[in-house]
């Protein structure tokens, strides 16, 4: 049976100060190669679309950085773990795959199938998977407000 989502995915920051529960996350993982994601984490952001129903425990440790006109990034103020990239208008969470306890799901179900900002990917790394690749301009044409032109 083919599934498209994982229900009730649990995760935690490095220090354990923030627990996260995602009602439903996509099985499709993607990589973002934009300059901001690479600066934020030292490499591409490998993440899942977690929709809009996301709950955090102990929100006193959840801090938010306003990274653009349409998105913000969250992190744990105690250990610095990256918690999310959230679109302001829709409330959609894109969350780092490393946050989650994948022991609760069959990893064979997970699919790395897309990369964005492929035009900003440095030459010093390459993924072997065949994926759908989008440039920054292609992504902006689909999602960004007309007056915003960079991440």
Image (cartoon, grey):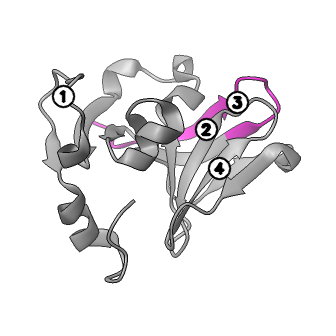
Q: Which residue is mark 1?
A: 123
Q: What residue did someone put label 3 on?
A: 13
Label 1 SS: loop
Q: Earlier in the sequence, mark 2 or mark 4?
A: 4
Q: Point out which mark residue 4 bears.
A: none
Per the image, the residue denoted by label 4 is 74
- Disc nearer the start of the sequence (2/3): 3
Give the foreground label among 4 and 3.
Answer: 4
Q: Secondary structure at mark 2?
A: strand
Disc 2 to disc 4, how far (Cα)?
Answer: 6 Å
Q: Nearer the viewer, mark 1 or mark 3?
A: 1
Which span of residues is magenta-colored? 1-20
Residue lying at 58% horizontally and 23% vertically, measured from the top left = 101
Residues tagged 2 and 4 counted as in contact (Cβ below 8 A): yes
* Left or right of 17 in this view: 146: left
User: Residue 107, relative to residue 54: is it above or below?
Assistant: above
């Amino acid at each position: 049976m083919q599934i498209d989502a994982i229900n009730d995915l649990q995760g935690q920051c490095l220090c354990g100060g923030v627990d996260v529960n995602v009602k439903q996350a996509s099985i499709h993982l993607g990589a973002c190669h934009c300059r901001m994601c690479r600066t934020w984490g030292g490499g591409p952001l490998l993440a899942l679309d977690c929709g809009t129903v996301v709950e955090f425990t102990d929100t006193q440790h959840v801090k938010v950085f306003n990274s653009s006109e349409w998105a913000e990034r969250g992190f744990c103020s105690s250990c610095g773990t990256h918690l999310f990239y959230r679109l302001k208008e829709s409330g959609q969470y894109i969350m780092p795959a490393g946050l989650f306890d994948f022991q609760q799901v069959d990893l064979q179900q997970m699919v790395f199938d897309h990369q964005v900002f492929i035009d900003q990917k440095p030459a010093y790394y390459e993924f072997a998977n065949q994926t759908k690749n989008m440039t920054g301009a292609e992504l902006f044409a689909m999602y960004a407000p007309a007056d915003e032109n960079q991440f």
